Image (cartoon, grey):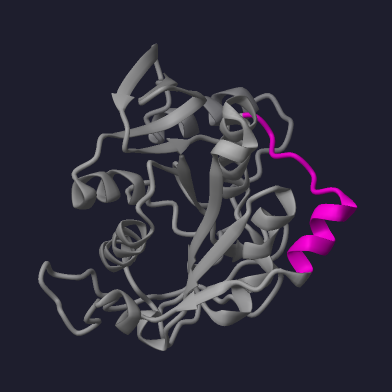
């Protein structure tokens, strides 16, 4: 069995984030890290491998990003994945979700995988549509927003947590699945894993290797037309303690349709 895990590099959650006002792209020149929900996806794949037998399951990390994202991708190797492949191409700078999903679908088809595990929503783009898009492009079932995951034979069973209900989902392999932030925490790599990841040579591909034409705008791509910095928050009205404070507070809440 072959499992592909999607893992990307994102701006560190605990660092300052900014946008380039000229290009409309996220500034990735600061602190970066492997996406946390992507690490949970790696954890999900490794748990399946441990249950089915590591000798029978190959876990590989797939990523689309710049060459400098290799260190974040190696995080998956350090955790226990055997291989990692990156698609790195200057023509992918600013790629939208449609282009990203197209590239990933071509990469998955190349690898002949049985299961693709992703995070439901990345911490930078936050679109939450890559897994469903892959399901459509590959013509595979896609199960998303999962809190648990299990594979038995050629059937994948998962728990999906919604706002008002919890559902049990099943699908036949091959399939695409996406785990949520509520999935089990990712394991910490041990020293042996970190050293193995440091020495591991990653496979690097371009759009030409996958037969993807970056100039093909069918279907239409999303294009950034303008961007501006959010205006600073204005200081609110301060109501001092007095006999009229309660009345002023009520008037304010009514003006905001809060009561």
> Residue 84 versus residue 218: which sits nearer the camera?
84
Q: Residue at x 42, y 27 (%)?
A: 258
Q: Position of residue 171 (x, y in %)?
A: 30, 25
Nearer to the camera, 156 or 73? 156
Does residue 195 appear to the left or right of 95 in the view shown? right
Residue 46 visible here = no
Query: Where does the image place residue 118, in percent across and percent down from the top left?
Result: 46, 45
Q: In this view, does 20 lie above or below 153?
A: below
Can residue 188 be seen? yes
Residue under the image location 26 percent in, 78 percent down: 225
Quarter that holds the C terminus: top left
| x then y, percent, for residue 201 | 65, 73
- Residue 218 is a magenta residue: no
Residue plotted at (19% across, 85% down): 215
- The span shown in magenta is 184-198
Q: In which quarter of the image is residue 78?
A: bottom right
* Residue 162: % across, % down: 40, 21
Q: Nearer the viewer, residue 190 or 89?
A: 190
Residue at horizontal 26 percent and vertical 44 percent from the top = 135
The correct choice, above or below, for 72 with respect to 158 in the image is below
> Where on the picture, by quarter, is residue 175?
top left
Q: Decide: is 13 above or below 116.
A: below
């Amino acid at each position: 069995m072959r499992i592909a895990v999607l893992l990307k590099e994102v701006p560190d959650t605990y660092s300052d984030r900014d946008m380039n006002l000229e290009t409309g792209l996220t500034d990735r020149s600061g602190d970066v890290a492997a996406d946390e929900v992507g690490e949970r996806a790696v954890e999900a794949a490794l748990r399946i491998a441990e249950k089915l037998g590591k000798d029978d399951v190959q876990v590989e990390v797939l990523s689309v990003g710049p060459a400098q994202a290799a260190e974040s991708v190696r995080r998956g190797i350090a955790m226990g994945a055997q291989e990692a492949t990156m698609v790195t191409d200057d023509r992918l700078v600013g790629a939208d979700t449609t282009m990203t999903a197209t590239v990933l679908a071509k990469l998955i088809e190349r690898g002949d995988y049985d299961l693709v595990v992703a995070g439901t929503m990345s911490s930078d783009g936050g679109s939450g549509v890559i897994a469903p898009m892959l399901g459509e492009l590959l013509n595979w079932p896609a199960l998303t927003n999962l809190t648990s995951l299990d594979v038995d034979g050629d059937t994948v069973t998962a728990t999906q947590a919604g706002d008002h209900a919890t559902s049990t989902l099943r699908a036949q392999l091959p399939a695409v699945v996406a785990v949520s932030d509520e999935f089990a925490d990712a394991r910490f790599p041990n020293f042996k894993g970190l050293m193995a990841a440091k020495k591991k040579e990653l496979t690097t591909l371009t759009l030409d290797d996958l037969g993807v034409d970056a100039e093909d705008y069918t279907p239409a791509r999303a294009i950034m037309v303008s961007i501006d910095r959010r205006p600073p928050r204005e200081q609110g009205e301060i109501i001092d303690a007095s006999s009229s404070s309660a009345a002023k507070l009520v008037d304010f809440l009514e003006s905001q349709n809060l009561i």
